Amino acid sequence: MAIIESIPNVSEGRRLDVVEQLAAAVRAVPGARLLDYSSDATHNRSVFTLAGEAGPLKAAILALFERAVASIDLRTHQGAHPRLGAVDVVPFVPIDGVTMAECVALATEVAAIVAKRFDLPVYLYEEASRDPARRSLEDIRRGGFEGLAGKMAAPGWQPDYGPVSPHPSAGATVIGARLPLIAYNINLQTDRLEVARAVAAAVRYSSGGLRYVKAMGLAIEDRGIVQVSMNLTNYEQTPIYRVFDLVQREAARYGVAVLESEIIGLVPAAALTAVAAYHLQIARFGTDRILENRLRDA
Amino acid sequence: MAIIESIPNVSEGRRLDVVEQLAAAVRAVPGARLLDYSSDATHNRSVFTLAGEAGPLKAAILALFERAVASIDLRTHQGAHPRLGAVDVVPFVPIDGVTMAECVALATEVAAIVAKRFDLPVYLYEEASRDPARRSLEDIRRGGFEGLAGKMAAPGWQPDYGPVSPHPSAGATVIGARLPLIAYNINLQTDRLEVARAVAAAVRYSSGGLRYVKAMGLAIEDRGIVQVSMNLTNYEQTPIYRVFDLVQREAARYGVAVLESEIIGLVPAAALTAVAAYHLQIARFGTDRILENRLRDA
C-alpha cells in the first residue's frame, strides 16, 4: 500500500470550534487518516497530519479547503507566524511504497483543482516547484497576506494556478512535495538570547552550517531559557545526532549546556534508530533488523 | 490484532535442507508469519522468528515440532551450544495487544499438546514456570541431552508434562513465556580475552552487574578481537544505552576501546528509540511521537 503523508497548515489556532470542524471534515473522508493535529494560539495556526493513499488524501485535503475557505478570513487574522492564506501550506510527503514523483503529481493535481474550485491563487513549492527562484516556502511567503496583492503584480510572482490577484478572504495557498521534515528544538540552559542566535547561525545552512538545517534562536520567556528552533529537511543526509552534537559543541564555547531537546509533531522511526545506531556504534545496521518492520513487510 | 512472537531454537544448523523443510512447514500455516531464520554451523543450531495471533502461531509451532522430531536425532547431534532436545526451546513473547498472562496460557497449552502428541517431556520456563527453582533456561538445560536421563530421575526435575524419561531421539523441550530479549554483542578493540571476560563479569547480573543482563566474554579468533556477548532480558528496565555506556567505561580501565556493537536477530523499535531519546536528551518523549506508530494505530 502506498502511504503518503500531508501536513496542511491552517491559519486558525484560537477558535478551537473551527479547528474541530476542520478535523471533522477530514475525518469524514473514508481512507484518509488524521494522525495528529495541534493548535498554537500565539501563532494563531493549526497543523494537521494526515496519511493515506493518493485518492483519499486528495479528497481529505479538498474537504479541508472547503471548510477553511468558508470559515477563515485573513483580513481579520492576526498571529506571530508568517502566512499567505487560510490554508497556508500543504506539503505531500512520500512515506512508504511511493516515489517523490508521485507526490509531485498529486500536489500538482490538487493545486489545479483548488485554484479552479475556490478561485484561489496557488503557488507550487519545493519538489513541485517549476521555478528555482521560488522553490522555498520562505521566499514565496515573504511579505505575508498583507503584501500579497503587490507581490502577485510583480514580475516573476504570477501564481502557478488560479487568478493573478488574492482571494479576498482566503489569500493564496502554497502546495508542494518534500521529504519528511523534522521540527526539532534544542533548549539551552541560559537566558542569553545571543547564545541561541549564535548557535543557530553556526548550525544552519544559510549561514554556513549543515546543509539540511534551518534554525533560529528565540527566547522562551516564561521559562527563562532560550531555544535553537530548527527544521531538519533531510534527516538521511543531515542526521539528528550530528545536529545535536554540533549544537552542544557550539553552545559549550559560551559555557552553556543543553537542557533538553524536543520533537514537534511526528518523527519517522528511522530518524531515531539512526541515532541509536550511531551512539551504540552498531555495525552494519539496517532497519530490517527492527521487529516492527518485519511484521509490517512479512 | 493481538501479535505474539515465538522464537523456537532447533538443534540443527548444518543440514540446511532440513532447516529449509522446517521453514516450509511453518510457512505452510496460514496466518503465521516467518519473520526471520538463521543457522549457525558451530552451534549446529537454527533460530526461527515467528509472529501471529495465538491460533495460527500454535499451529505453526506444532508443525515445526512434527518435522523436527522426525528429522533430528540428538544421539548423533554435536555442537558448541548447550541443548536438551530436537526443538530445544520455544519462548512466546507478547508484542502488541496481548498480555504476558495470555502468552503463559498459550505456552502451557502448547506444552500439553506437544507432550501428548510426541510423547516428549516438556519443562515450562521463565514466566510460565511453576517452580522458582527451575525458572531459568540455564538451570533447566544444565547437563545437556547427555545428562538428561539422570537429571530427570533426580528429585525436583520431573517434567511439567509428558513422560519422566527422555524421548530417545528428540530428548526434551523447554517451553515458556518471556519479555522480548535482545541478543546484543559489543566487540572490543583488543585480542585480550581476559578483558572481555572482566567486562562481562562487571556488567552481568549474576556477578553484581545490571539486573537484566546476561553476559560472557569470548574470542573472535579469525578477527583477532574479543566480544562481550550479551542477552538483554528487559530493555525497558535495563536500557541498551546504559549497557553500552557501562561496557565502554569498564573496557576503558584496561585501555581498551569499543570497536563496534551488533544486534543479533530482531530488535523492538522502542529499544532503539529509547537510545535516541537518551542521547538527544529529548524531553517528554513518548513512542506516540513516532509516525509509524500513529499510522499503525490510526
Image (cartoon, coloured by chain):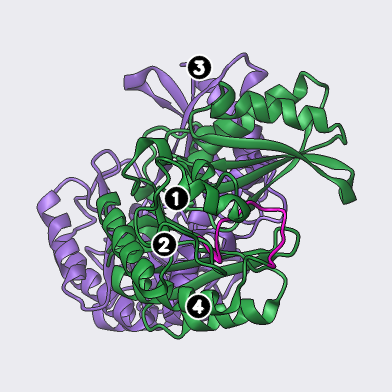
Chain colours: A purple, B green
Q: Which residue is mark 3?
A: A192
Q: Are marks 1 and 4 on the same chain?
A: no
| Disc 2 to disc 1, C-alpha distance | 9 Å
- If you read the primary sequence from the N terminus, does the residue marked by circle 4 or circle 3 appear first? 4
Helix, strand or loop at mark 2? strand
- If you read the primary sequence from the N terminus, does the residue marked by circle 2 or circle 1 appear first? 2
Q: Which residue is mark 1?
A: B180
Residue A232 in sight in this render = no
Helix, strand or loop at mark 3? loop
| Disc 4 to disc 3, C-alpha distance | 45 Å
Residue type indicated by callout 4: Val
Provide the chain ID for the residue under circle 3.
A
For mark 1, does the 10 Å Cα neighbourhood hold few (<14), some (14 to 19), or many (20 or more) residues? many
Provide the chain ID for the residue under circle 1.
B
Residue range (magenta): B76-88
Q: Is residue B80 magenta?
A: yes
User: In the image, A89: left or right of B276?
Assistant: left
Helix, strand or loop at mark 1? loop
Provide the chain ID for the residue under circle 4.
A
The relative height of residue B253 versus residue A76 in the rendered view (above or below) is above
Give residue A98's mark: 4
Determine the residue positioned at 14% across, 50% down.
A16
Q: What secondary structure do most residues of the magenta stretch adopt?
A: loop
